[in-house]
Image (cartoon, rainbow, N blue to C red):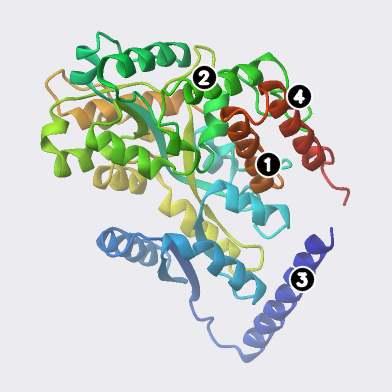
């Protein structure tokens, strides 16, 4: 509560200063100078300089009262720089954030609600399943920009030699893992445990993340135990490398490219990396949908644009954000890089329709990814104390995998921790 009050006090002071400045300009009778907004992105330069600068030039031509200063920030430095800028009361006006970090800022009232600045018609242009993921305690905190969804990329040659089909769900994965291990002494899968992957995998397997009131874990019952048992069996039966406990997605990519792992769950953009770096492997690659239970939603990841509450130029910032995330500009980005747009209209474009059988593999992957996105969700929504919840989940999952805890004990300990952090997860009184 204290942190939230401090942020509100800082915001109020910023508005007071802005009001005094505006009064002085009016009294002088001079024409107001164009508003300058700072736009921070994550690691888009230099490869996308032409695209971003072109967008800015087009926006400024149509909006002569606004000037945009673009600042590109390295991926690893973004959170630190944003927090430092907010603490110094000099945040960017518009910043590219991932949902979990944006939710952390929203928890302290540090982000402006886009629904207070965009019309209902503008909000309706975005995919509703994605827009709804950018909410914290009922309040929207960001505009979705570009999206990604994972697909299954597999080595056709190895699976065929093992007499196995590409698995469609986790039960089939366990069977296929045994076949590949017995036939080649290799692994079928490397379950990355970094980021939100373990939580997403559990939801994809059919478990609920939260209970009905969002005050605790939703996986205390059989569905949660089934997921923990699945990971324990993979590990204790030697069906996954032992370093799954210490390494993540980067290692999974490395092992797939070396042929030690038969399939990988990753974004369609990885296909281009294989094509360039491993042409021989690329000729053996096939694609399939995400591993999931039939009733589970597909997993989608979103990158967002957020406007800090401390920005004195929120109206201009949201105007530019709406321009950046328009159908036209998102389609231009999707044609440059293998990512997906967040606007409804974009998915009607022939670019995302299923191609002819002879089309390049990336075209088939793009169509599959688009279909999953339209039916998908952000499986791990913004949560208070997310890092503590995730760490508790992974720590106890690994304890069950190595046999330090029984499956029942591990699930119970996670549930107890989640109840502690989520038990007061209710909307604060004004």
Q: Are marks 2 and 3 in contact (CB under 8 Å)?
A: no
Secondary structure beneath dot 1 equals: helix
Q: Residue at x 20, y 22 (%)?
A: 355
Q: Are marks 4 and 2 in contact (CB under 8 Å)?
A: no
Residue 284 appears in view: yes
Distance from label 1 to label 2 (Cα)?
A: 24 Å
Q: Residue at x 58, y 62 (%)?
A: 315
Above-or-below relation of 175 to 398: above
Can you identify the residue that label 1 sits on?
389
Left or right position of 325 against 394: left
Q: Which mark is residue 12?
A: 3
Please state which of the two labelled residues, at mark 1 or mark 2, is closer to the viewer.
Answer: 2
Please state which of the two labelled residues, at mark 4 or mark 2, is closer to the viewer.
Answer: 2
Secondary structure beneath dot 4 equals: loop
Distance from label 2 to label 3 (Cα)?
A: 55 Å
| Residue 11 percent across, percent down from the top left | 73, 69
For disc 3, the neighbor class at 10 Å (few under 14, some 14 to 19, many from 20) is some
């Amino acid at each position: 509560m204290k942190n939230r009050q401090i942020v509100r006090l800082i915001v109020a002071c910023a508005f007071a200063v802005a009001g005094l400045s505006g009064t002085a300009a009016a009294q002088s009778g001079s024409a107001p100078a164009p508003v300058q907004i700072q736009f921070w992105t994550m690691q888009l330069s230099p490869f996308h300089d032409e695209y971003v600068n072109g967008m800015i030039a087009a926006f400024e031509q149509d909006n002569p009262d606004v000037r945009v200063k673009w600042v590109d920030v390295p991926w690893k430095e973004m959170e630190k720089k944003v927090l430092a800028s907010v603490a110094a009361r000099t945040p960017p006006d518009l910043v590219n954030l991932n949902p979990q970090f944006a939710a952390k800022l929203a928890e302290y009232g540090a982000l402006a609600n886009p629904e207070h600045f965009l019309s209902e018609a503008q909000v309706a242009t975005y995919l509703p399943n994605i827009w709804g993921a950018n909410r914290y305690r009922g309040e929207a905190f960001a505009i979705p920009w570009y999206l990604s969804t994972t697909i299954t990329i597999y080595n056709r040659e190895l699976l065929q030699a093992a007499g196995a089909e590409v698995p469609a769900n986790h039960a089939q994965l366990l069977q296929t893992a045994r076949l590949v291990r017995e036939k080649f002494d290799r692994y079928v899968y490397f379950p990355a445990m970094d980021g939100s992957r373990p939580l997403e995998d559990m939801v994809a397997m059919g478990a609920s993340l939260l209970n009905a009131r969002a005050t605790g874990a939703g996986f205390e019952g059989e569905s949660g135990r089934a997921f923990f048992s699945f990971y324990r069996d993979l590990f204790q039966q030697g069906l996954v490398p032992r370093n799954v406990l210490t390494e993540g997605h980067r290692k999974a990519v490395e092992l797939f490219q070396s042929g030690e792992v038969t399939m990988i769950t990753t974004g369609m953009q990885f296909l281009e990396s294989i094509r360039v770096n491993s042409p021989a492997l690329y000729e053996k690659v096939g694609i399939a949908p995400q591993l999931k239970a039939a009733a589970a939603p597909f997993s989608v990841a979103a990158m967002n644009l957020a406007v800090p509450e401390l920005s004195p130029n929120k109206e201009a910032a949201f105007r530019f954000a709406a321009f950046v995330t328009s159908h036209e500009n998102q389609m231009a980005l999707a044609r440059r890089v293998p990512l997906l747009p967040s606007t409804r209209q974009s998915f009607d474009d022939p670019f995302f329709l299923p191609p002819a059988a002879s089309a390049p593999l990336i075209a088939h992957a793009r169509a599959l990814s688009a279909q999953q996105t339209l039916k998908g969700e952000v499986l791990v929504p913004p949560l208070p104390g997310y890092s503590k919840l995730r760490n508790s989940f992974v720590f106890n999952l690994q304890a069950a995998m190595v046999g330090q805890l029984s499956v029942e004990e591990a699930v119970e300990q996670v549930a107890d921790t989640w109840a502690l952090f989520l038990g007061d997860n209710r909307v604060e009184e004004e």
